[in-house]
Amino acid sequence: MDTLYKDVIYEILNHNDSKTISSLLSINKYFYSFANDHPMIKQRKLLSKELKKTIIDTRKYYTSEILNLKIGDRVTDRVKNYIVVNISKRIGILEEVDLYGNQLGIYTPAKVYNMKRYKLPYEKNNSFWSTIHYDNESIIINKLNNGIIKHEYGPLIKHIDSHYLNYITKQQYIFWHNDIGTPELNILVTVCYKWKIYEYYVYYMDDNYIKLKLVDINESIDDILIVNKINNKCINKKFNIIFYGGWKV
């Protein structure tokens, strides 16, 4: 791809005089300066900086191998984003942050949790860093991992060019969804076909039907889907719509 870009640029330059080439150079410098100050570029730089804090490092903990957390590390329990603000051998303090690392002033304890696996040999890897959440009367223990999610219960962002940043996504938690959500333009959609999950996005909609386009064009499946609206329900006889705003886990 870089070679193609260079060939196109040289082709343009070879058909212009020196004055025109100088003008193009000046425009390019101005464009770079202008683009460099654009909010989206600034957010991209912030995200790149934060992703460098997600590098995985581990250490031995008795018979297990757990994360070797350090102050400043970005971690997630797939519910929220955190930054490590205090850490010891088996307990720590995390502060909630957003996608770009803005601190929210909400603190959460972290601890090394030992999962009892009665049917497995003792030497199995059964300890991990965790957070504890309370859902009514239930206690939910979530495993911590180095990483960043787009939003609460959102997709994992692994690099600055992640396609999840280009589409609308919603909180995806399997125990919450009693319906498939609400379609809207540019929203990511999970579709099931023959027991496999695919990602589409909505690129057109009106009162009668919705058009979906496949995200990964290398998948061997229909790249365009038409979903009919019947009695306020979205129906496609061949494909099963799972969730509007969802993604492959």
Image (tube, rainbow, N blue to C red):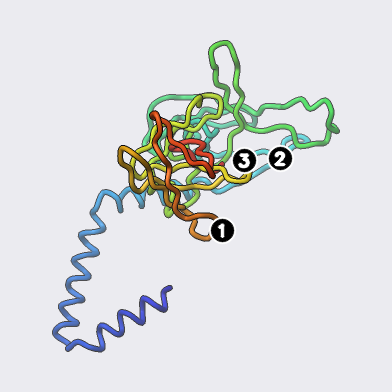
Crowd band around label 3 with a 10 angstrom C-alpha radius: few (<14), some (14–19), many (20+): some
Q: Which mark is residue 220?
A: 1
Q: CA distance from mark 1 to mark 3?
A: 41 Å
Q: Nearer the viewer, mark 3 or mark 2?
A: 2
Residue 239: x and y, percent? 53, 43
Instruction: Please state, as top left, top right, bottom left or bottom right, where the C terminus lies in the image.
Output: top right
Tag 2, which secondary structure? Answer: strand
- Residue 82 in view in this figure: no
Residue found at x 19% / y 87%:
16
Looking at the rendered structure, the number of numbered marks drawn on it comes to: 3
Residue 104: x and y, percent? 38, 29
Crowd band around label 1 with a 10 angstrom C-alpha radius: few (<14), some (14–19), many (20+): few
Q: Amino acid at mark 3?
A: Asn
Q: Nearer the viewer, mark 1 or mark 3?
A: 1
Q: Amino acid at mark 2?
A: Glu
Crowd band around label 2 with a 10 angstrom C-alpha radius: few (<14), some (14–19), many (20+): some
Residue 154: x and y, percent? 47, 36
Q: Is residue 59 above or below residue 16?
A: above
Q: Amino acid at mark 1?
A: Ser
Q: Is residue 184 above or below residue 216?
A: above
Q: Which mark is residue 100?
A: none
- Residue 32 in view in this figure: yes
Q: Which mark is residue 68?
A: 3
Q: CA distance from mark 3 to mark 2?
A: 9 Å
Tag 1, which secondary structure? Answer: loop
Residue 95 shown left or right of residue 87 in the figure: left
Q: Earlier in the sequence, mark 1 or mark 2?
A: 2
User: Label 2: which residue?
Assistant: 65
